[in-house]
Image (tube, rainbow, N blue to C red):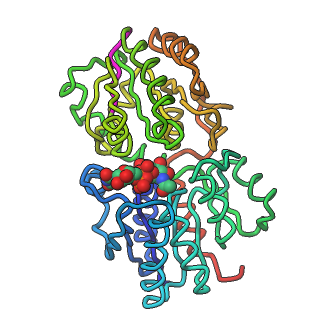
Amino acid sequence: MNLIQVVGARPNFMKIAPLFRAVARRGFARQRLVHTGQHYDAAMSEVFFRDLAMPAPDVFLGVGSGSHAEQTAAVLVAAEKLFSAERPDLVVVAGDVNSTLACALAAAKLGIPVAHVEAGLRSRDRSMPEEINRILTDQLAELLFTPSPDGDENLEREGVPGAKIRRVGNVMIDSLLAHLPAARRSGILGRLGLCAKGYGLLTLHRPGNVDDPAVLSRLLGALGELAREEPIVFPVHPRTRRRLSEFGLSAAGLRLVEPLGYLDFLSLTDGAALVLTDSGGIQEETTVLGIPCLTLRENTERPITVEVGTNQLVGLDPHRIVAEGRRALAGDGKRGRIPDLWDGHAADRMAEAIERWRPGG
Ligand code: UD1
């Protein structure tokens, strides 16, 4: 079997790394790793290859940034050329970024089957670009790997035949469990002068939270107030960095640092008293590590982290953020348990399913 696995942006790397390794271990396919170049900075891309011990990409498409149409179109054109030349038997895409949809579309139109890692997640909020990418990618895929039962239910509701769906668990957790011992040796807490359980960790990059100056400034106000209790470390995404400077906002009281590599970020998550985020994957990582997580959004495509995990949707209400944040910093945050199949073996289950899979069946 000839397999192409695609990565494009930061949240793809930890999903594809374990699968690439698991397929190599089973030895049934010749596989190529393609990087679209949606994320291209050392801090957003290169460091993840190192931290996750991923092989260098076989092909780098170098598409870079742009509007949604520009970025999606650039990947679409480059991927069509590549897939036409290589004619893989299966293209594997992950998550919900623009590169995911563009590669799925390029492959599907060439009649090349697509496998989607992390299928079936739905926020039911179509103002999120990622939600559009999820819905369309799932309609194009022939093999859909879901992390939790809600994924299966969403797909069935949208008419995806059950025979295409495989519930394999959460592959991000494979990366987390494999790298946690190394992360705990990373030394980042010492470098930042932090004590375990004596700080909060914040990430913020969703367009809905950072592209409107009024929303961003209100959020930063609440977070600054919370930071009077304990330090709040804030690795700043490039999109957010740009908005802060465009809007002349200072993020007063927060400890701003550059985006971190996988091991440093995992270590900071593991040591935190509280995580505040608008990311998707971090809601899952905190649930597995048992760290209270306040999600700064009105909805989540990962409801299982709220139903059984440590996640709470607090939205953008400053009072709620401060009140729940204080409670967690005082050691009284939400507790939870780990969802089924988030056990570090999702990549093995996917590799086995790919090995057994036959086109049209
Ligand atoms: C993208 C994904 C989002 C994911 C996030 C993780 C889409 C629609 N969104 O959002 O789902 O959670 O990545 O980070 O695909 N930039 C750099 N250096 C880089 C990459 C980006 O400076 O290496 C800048 C770009 O110039 C751009 C901004 O960051 O202005 C946003 O990048 P982009 O890839 O468009 O979307 P993200 O907001 O990162």
Residue 146 lies left or right of residue 199; in this view the side is right
Judging depth in this view, the residue of 68 and 320 nearest the camera is: 68
* Front one among 297 and 242: 242
Rendering coords of residue 261 (x, y %): 29, 45
**Residue 31 on the magenta segment:** no
Q: Is residue 154 visible?
A: yes
Image: 179 above or below 272: below
At horizontal 42% and vertical 81% (from top left) the residue drawn is: 30
- Taking 277 as reference, is 119 above or below it? below
Quadrant location of residue 197?
top left
What segment is highlighted magenta in the picture? 229-234
Q: Position of residue 176 (x, y in %)?
A: 42, 44
**Which residue is painted at 45% across and 71% down in the image?**
5
Kindly tell me whether residue 14 is visible in this rendering.
no
User: Residue 297 sits in which quadrant?
Assistant: top right
Residue pictured at 41% horizontal, 62% vertical: 8
- Asked if residue 17 is positioned above or below residue 344 in the image, the reply reads below
Residue 140 location in percent, x, y? 65, 71
- Rendered-image quadrant of the C terminus: bottom right
Tell me the quarter of the picture where residue 163 sits. bottom right
Give the residue at x 45% y 32%. 213
